[in-house]
Amino acid sequence: MSRVVVEAARALRHAIHDFDPETLSALDAAAVAGELSLAEKACAAARALAGARAAQCGAHKEMGFSDAASWLAHQAGTTSRQAKESLALTVALAACPETKDALLAGEVSVAQAQEIVRCAADLPGAEKDLLDVARRGDLSDVREQAREKRLSSIPVGDLHRRQLAARHFRHWKDGMGMICFDGALPPETGIPFVSRLERQATHLRDDARRNRCEERFEVHAADALVALSTGNGYEAKARSDLVIVCDLFAWRRGHAHDGEPCHLIGGGPIPVELAKELSKDAFFKIVLHDGKDVQRVHHAGRKCTAQLRTALDLGPVPAFNGRACVDCGRTWGLQNDHVDPVAHTGPTSLENVKARCWTCHAEKTAYDRKAGLLGRKAKSRLNSSNVAAPSGRDQLADRSPPADGDPPADGDPPADVDPPADVSSPIAAHRGRQLTHRPQPTRK
């Protein structure tokens, strides 16, 4: 058998030596490229297996090499590290016979097989799914699928602890005296960093194109890194987006159950505690869905949009007689007031923002503070509650109005304060990153 393989390999090398692709049609060239790709993957597999067998028998010592990796690296023209990975693959293939057969058939590459066996060692039963991905796609597809499977198998709290423990940074000088570096950041810090760097690099590339100075994007990325680190970049003071998807029930409960997502877009699952920590300076977006289709999307923020300001300036429908205090009717010294306060997750919407004069606004704020809708008390109530936090209207409805002439009880609103508008989903507006909630139907 070995003689047949050796003779076939020699014949292939001689045929390739006289090969001239210029004489081929497009279809013939594509056919040759496809068949040689299969042969290359099969040859790499056979070489690794043969090299492992030779190393096991000590053949490398007879050829003057102290270790098998150095000998195999010399034979293949690779590094010792790559040779060690190749030898490790041959050992791991014993537990993945389907991958070994696909590798020798040229259906998957050595790099794809390495990803498959590593994932299969951690997750028994993942081999078949990854083999299907490898046959249909490339190495990136296999890595992405393997990463998803691996992340989903680790408890989210343990995963985050591992990510924090794995963060690192190191630097060195290369042969040209260039400063090189390598590192890893957990998703909650790495994603915003990369996002800002790419935006800065895009800005630099656009400037270069306007000046007709074309360079590779990675060159602009290097300049962007310097600009951001020195605080002189276009994105040095810009907001960096970090999008978090968190199920509303998981948010209230403090941990997620199966089917309740809590993850970073592009970064994998995170603990609900971390999502809450990151949301301290976040804008909230509410996505209502029925399990299949998105029904409604709402963006909540403290800042009024131009459309909202226009609607507020027009006044109530259908009179459109301009803004006036909803309590006393004054038309001067008006301020925008959130009926259901932002600290109590009230949205910045036409239904929840009303005009109030300074005096009425101060009285309303004092009432909200007594009712526990502001400050730490409101946040602690929302974070510790397992059910939807009551809106301002719900709280008012629970109180009996004082009798005529009696002073309002502690926490009761002034008589001229309208009850807050009802809000269907608790949301909050902050600055910086973004948080997406996924409200679901109320559980019985």
Image (spheres, helix red, strand yellow):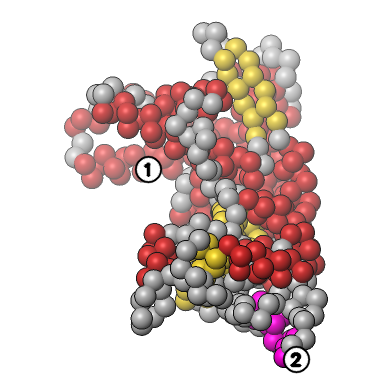
* Residue 345 visible, this orientation: no
Judging depth in this view, the residue of 324 and 435 nearest the camera is 324
Total numbered circles: 2
* Residue 273 visible, this orientation: yes
Q: Residues within 10 Å of mark 1 (few under 14, many from 20)?
A: few
Q: Disc 1 to disc 2, how far (Cα)?
A: 91 Å
Please indicate whether residue 304 sits to the left or right of residue 125 in the image.
left
Q: Give percent across and percent down for residue 71.
A: 64, 19
Amino acid type for the residue under numbered disc 2: Ala
Q: Earlier in the sequence, mark 1 or mark 2?
A: 1
The quadrant of the picture occupied by the C terminus is: bottom right
Residue at image location 36% in from the left, 81% down from the top: 319
- Relative to 134, is 338 above or below? below
Please indicate whether residue 306 sits to the left or right of residue 141 in the image.
left
Disc 1 on helix, strand or loop?
helix
Q: Residues within 10 Å of mark 2 (few under 14, many from 20)?
A: few
The quadrant of the picture occupied by the N terminus is: top right
Q: Give percent across and percent down for residue 257.
A: 73, 69
Residue at image location 50% in from the left, 75% down from the top: 329
* Residue bearing mark 1: 35
Amino acid type for the residue under numbered disc 1: Glu
Q: Give percent across and percent down for residue 418.
A: 60, 80
The span shown in magenta is 391-404
The numbered disc on residue 142 is: none
Disc 2 on helix, strand or loop?
loop
* Residue bearing mark 2: 403
